[in-house]
């Protein structure tokens, strides 16, 4: 699959909003910590579809022509295959967010290519590392981050309960030092 990368613009904003990043959940990571080290086990769960909230146009528009952050789109055969954003976080790490790959583009290296572009953006700015947050039910993404050298640095069992009191989702925080 040949990818063409384009920055977010007013012309392609609708592509981002239209991308369906839903995925099937068949397992969850169960994190634990001991002596400051975070590990996890995988546990199968009854299969269900996970769908994130739609991207808000007003939030995305802040990335257009911004010098301190980037929103990158990957196209394959003229169609949006995926996207990612990265910005300088309060701790000077590059914070990767808005990572999504369309269901028909998965397992073709799109997610890897987008994360690698976000890492390169952080390196160009001489940031000490990159970080991101995902959920314990996004196993495929977590495995990708591990393959790219990220380390699971922490987790939060309560982060999502303000919006979804009944949720079992656990926030996972992944880090990649760029020393």
Image: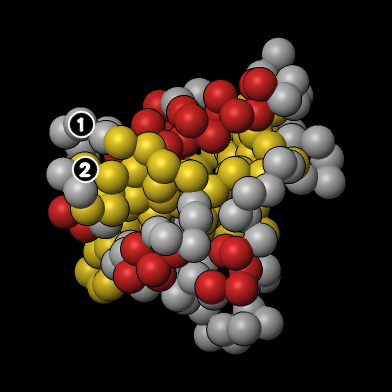
CB atoms at circles 2 and 1 under 8 Å apart?
yes
Residue that mark 1 sits on: 2
Nearer-the-camera pick, 1 or 144: 1
Residue that mark 2 sits on: 76
- How busy is the neighbourhood of tag 1: few (under 14 within 10 Å), some, or many (20 plus)? few
Give the vertical position of 95 relative to 63 (above or below): above
- What x and y, as percent, mark residue 80? 28, 53
Q: Quadrant of the N terminus?
A: top left
Residue 20 relative to residue 136: left or right = left
State how far apart marks 2 and 1 are (Cα): 6 Å
Nearer-the-camera pick, 129 or 67: 67
Label 1, secondary structure: give it: loop
The residue depicted at 39 percent of the width and 68 percent of the height is: 14
- What x and y, as percent, mark residue 2? 20, 31
- Tell me, yes or no, if residue 107 can be seen here: yes
Give the vertical position of 52 relative to 147 (above or below): below
- What x and y, as percent, mark residue 124? 66, 21
Indicate which disc, 2 or 1, sits on the residue closer to the N terminus: 1
Label 2, secondary structure: give it: strand
- The image quarter in which residue 44 lies: bottom left
- What x and y, as percent, mark residue 110? 30, 39
Nearer-the-camera pick, 61 or 121: 61
Give the vertical position of 83 relative to 21 (above or below): above
């Amino acid at each position: 699959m040949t990818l063409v990368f384009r920055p977010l613009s007013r012309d392609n904003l609708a592509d981002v909003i239209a991308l369906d990043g839903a995925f099937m959940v068949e397992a969850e990571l169960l994190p634990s910590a001991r002596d400051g080290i975070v590990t996890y086990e995988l546990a199968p769960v009854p299969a269900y579809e996970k769908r994130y909230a739609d991207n808000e146009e007003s939030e995305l528009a802040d990335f257009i022509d911004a010098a301190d952050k980037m929103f990158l789109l990957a196209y394959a055969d003229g169609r949006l295959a995926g996207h990612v954003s990265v910005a300088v976080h309060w701790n000077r790490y590059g914070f990767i967010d808005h990572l999504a790959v369309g269901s028909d583009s998965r397992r073709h290296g799109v997610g890897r290519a987008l994360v690698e572009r976000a890492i390169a953006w952080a390196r160009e700015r001489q940031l000490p590392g990159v970080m991101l947050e995902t959920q314990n039910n996004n196993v495929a993404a977590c495995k990708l981050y591990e393959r790219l050298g990220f380390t699971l640095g922490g987790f939060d069992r309560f982060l999502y309960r303000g919006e979804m009191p009944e949720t079992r989702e656990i926030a996972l925080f992944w880090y990649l030092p760029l020393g």
